[in-house]
Image (tube, grey):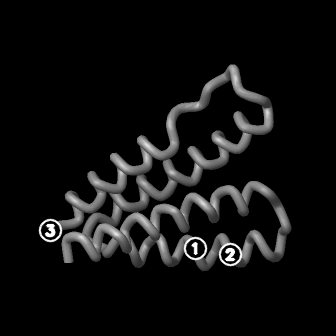
Amino acid sequence: MDSWDIIRDLMNYIYSEYPDIDIRTSKKKCRRRSYENMIIDEIMLQLMEYVFMDPMDVLEDYEIVYIHNAKMLNNDIYKFQLMVIRNMLYFLKRRNLKYG
């Protein structure tokens, strides 16, 4: 399978796992979903731009940066975004086991 298939599967997973922001939820949940959407958009743009790179490598690079930022800056934004990155990595690892 090529990178486009991986990106397509990842997009399908992300948009089912992280639905659009519902303004009827609390302000805290709305803010969290906004931060999650920010990192999802950034990563998906990066994957589209560097389509010939392995998506796992791209996500692992993001994970390293966000681990550092979460520890050094002690900010909830980075913690929320790091969880999204790790969920994406977990999905790709499961997908690789399934498809080889």
Q: In this view, does 3 lie above or below 17?
A: below
Q: Give the CA separation, mark 3 to mark 2.
A: 30 Å
The amino acid on which the numbered mark 3 sits, given as a three-letter code, is Met
- From mark 1 to mark 2, how far is it between C-alphas? 6 Å
Location of the C terminus by quadrant is bottom left
Circle 1: residue type: Glu
Quarter of the rendering containing residue 34: top right
Q: Position of residue 12 (x, y in %)?
A: 34, 46
Reading the chain from its start, which is encountered first: label 3 or label 1?
3
For this rendering, which residue is in front, 97 or 41?
97
Which percent across, then down, holds residue 16?
42, 42
Under tag 3, what secondary structure?
Answer: loop
Residue 67 circle label: 2
Q: Residue 59, image x and y in percent?
A: 47, 70
Question: Residue at left 35%, top 70%?
Answer: 94
Helix or strand or loop: what does disc 1 sit on?
helix
Residue at 41% over, 78% down: 57
